[in-house]
Image: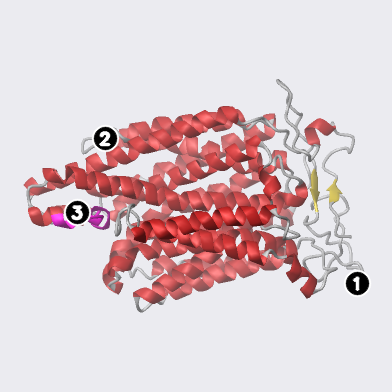
Amino acid sequence: MGTAKQIALEPTQATPSLGSSDGKELPPGACSAPEKDFEHGFRFWAIIIGLGITNLLGALENTVVSTSAPVILTDLQLGGNYIWITNAFFVCSAAFQPLFGQLCNVFGRRWVTLFIVAVFTLGSGICGGASNGGMLIAGRAVQGIGSGGIIMVIDIIVSDLVPLRQRGNYMAVVLAIYGIGTSLGPFIGGAIVSSTTWRWVFWINLPIGGASLVILYLFLHVNYSKQMSLGQKLKRIDFVGSIILMAGTVAILYALSYAGSTYPWSSWHTLIPLLLGFFGLVLFGFYESTGASAEPVMPPRLFNNRTSVIVSITTFINSALLFWIIFFLPVYFQTVKLYSPRRTGVALLPQSLVGIPGAAISAVALSRWGKFRPLHFAGFALWTLALGLFSLQDEDTSVAEWAVFQCIMALGAGMVLNTLLPSFQAPADEKDQAAATATWCFIRTLGYVWGVAIPATIFNNRVDAVLYRVSEPAIRAQLAGGGAYQSASAAFVKQFPPEYQDDIRAVYREALKRVWEIAVAFAGFACLLVFLEKEIALRVSLETEYGLQNPTKKEDPVNSNTDGNEVGEDVEGQVR
C-alpha cells in the first residue's frame, strides 16, 4: 500500500546494471538492449493526446504575444508597463513550478492537473476581457501560474507511464505539439491582430482548454495513496522552502524586468532585488539541506552527481537560447527585412517543420542506444553553427539562406530538447521523479527569462553604441534607451523617408549581429560542457506509485490507492 509497484515491462531478471534505478554509469562501450514493448491501449493514447493538447496551451502563450504586443500596448495604453505582459507570465510560471511538483505527490496527478488547466483557462478569459493594463497583467500572471504547472505536470505524467529508456519516444509526441505551438505562436498572433481584435490572442485558449479538461477528466485515472488524512498531507508540503524559493525567484525576475532598459545594471533599482533574489536562492539551498522539511520541494540529493549538475547548466543554456531566438529573430524579419507581422510568422515556420524531425530522431536514437551524450553534443554543435550563421544575416539575405539557417538551428534544438530531461532523471530514484521533473522544469523556465533579459541588454547597449549612424536626432531619441525593441516593426521603419530607413535598418542589423555573436558563445560553452557528462544507464523497467488504474478491478474501500473513484489500486503489472 502506497509503495512502488513493479510494472512488468520485461522479465524481472533483466540485467541489474542496465535496468536498475540506482543511476549507475555505463561501462565504456556498454549499451543495454532495448526493453520489450509495454502494453498501451486506447486510454494510454487518449492521455498522451490530452497532454499534447494541454501542452499546446502553454506553448502558444509563450510566444503568441510577441507579434501582437504592439497592438495590445496601443489599445490599453500600457506605456512603460508593457514589459509585464511577458514578465508577469514568466515570473509566476517559474515561481509555482516546484510547489506544483510536490502537490502532485501529495494529492495525486489527476486533480492537480485539472486544477492547473482550469487556472490557465481562467487566466486566458481574464486577459481576453481586459479593460485596462492592470487587468491584462493580472490575467497574464494567472496564465503564468497555469502554464508553468502545465509544462511540468505533463513531464511528470509521461514519466509515470513510460520507462525512462522509452520516455523520449512519447515525449516526442507531446514536444512536437509544443514545438508547433511555440513556432506558430508569432504567426497566429500576427494573423489575429491583422484580421480581428487582439482579444482572440487569448480567447483562442478557451476552447482548447475546454477540450483538454474534458479529455483529461475522462481518461486521466492514475494511482496515488489516499491513506493519509488532509492534515497529514498538508504536513508533507514544504511550505517554508516553497515560500523562500518563490520570494527569491520573484526578486530576481523583477530585477531582470528592468535591467538594461528602464534602469542600468549598475542601478540600485536593479542590484538590490537581484542580490536579494540570489541571497534567497542561497538561503533556500541551505534550508533544504538542513533536513528541516521531511519532503523538500527540491531535494539536494538530486545534485549529488556531476551529470545532474552539468545537465542543469545545459538545460538553462538551451532554454535561454530558445527564447533568444523567439524574441529576436522576429526583430530581424520586421526591421531589417521589413516583413509584416503575418509574413514574419510565415518566415518562422521552418523552425517547427524541422524541429519536430529533430526531436523524433533524438527520441528514436535514445530509445535504441540509450546514450544521451552524443545527442547533446550534436545538438549543441548545430546550435552553435546556426547562431553563427544568424550573425551573417542582413538586408540581402535570401529566403533560401535564412530558411536553411533556421533548419539547422531547429534540428539541433530538437535533438537537445528531447533528451535533457531523461538525462537529468537518470541518476534520480523513481520516488524522486516528480521532484526531479519539477526541478528541471524550474531551471528551464529560469532559462527562458534570462533568455530574454540577456539578449535584450546586449541589443539595447549595441543600439545605443551605433545610433550615431542615424543623422536625425528625433529618430535617435526614439531608438535610444530601450526604445528600439519597443519600436521593432516594419511599420515604424517605413514611416520615415527612404534615406532614414537605410540608417535605421543598419542600426537594427548591427545590434542583432552582436546578439547572435554572444549567443554563439553560450551555445559553444554548452557544447564543451557535454564532455563532462557521464553516460548513465537509462532504466528499462518502470517502478511507480502513479501508473494507470486497472479498469477491470473494483476499488477496495479499505485499501484504496487510486486517483479516481471507480477502480482499484493495482495495475496488475501492466499499463493498459
For the residue marked with disc 3, what is the amino acid? Leu
Indicate whether residue 174 is drawn in magenta. no
Determine if residue 548 is in view: yes
| Residue 271, percent from left and from top | 39, 56
Q: Which mark is residue 398?
A: 2
State whether residue 168 is above or below residue 534.
below
For the residue marked with disc 1, what is the amino acid? Pro
Q: Quadrant of residue 374?
A: top right
Spatial CA span between label 3 and label 2: 27 Å
Query: Which one is nearer the viewer's eye here, 9 or 460?
Result: 460
| Residue 113, percent from left and from top | 65, 64
Spatial CA span between label 3 and label 1: 68 Å
User: Which region shows up in magenta?
Assistant: 477-488
Find disc 3 in the rendering and name its residue. 479
State whether residue 88 is above or below residue 154.
below
| Residue 144, percent from left and from top | 50, 64
Find disc 1 in the rendering and name its residue. 557
Spatial CA span between label 2 and label 1: 68 Å
Q: Of tags 2 and 1, which is closer to the observer?
A: 1
Determine if residue 154 is in view: no
Label pair 3/2, CB-CB below 8 angstroms? no
Q: Secondary structure at mark 3?
A: helix
- Categorize mark 1 by other alpha carbons within 10 Å: few (<14), some (14-19), many (20+): few
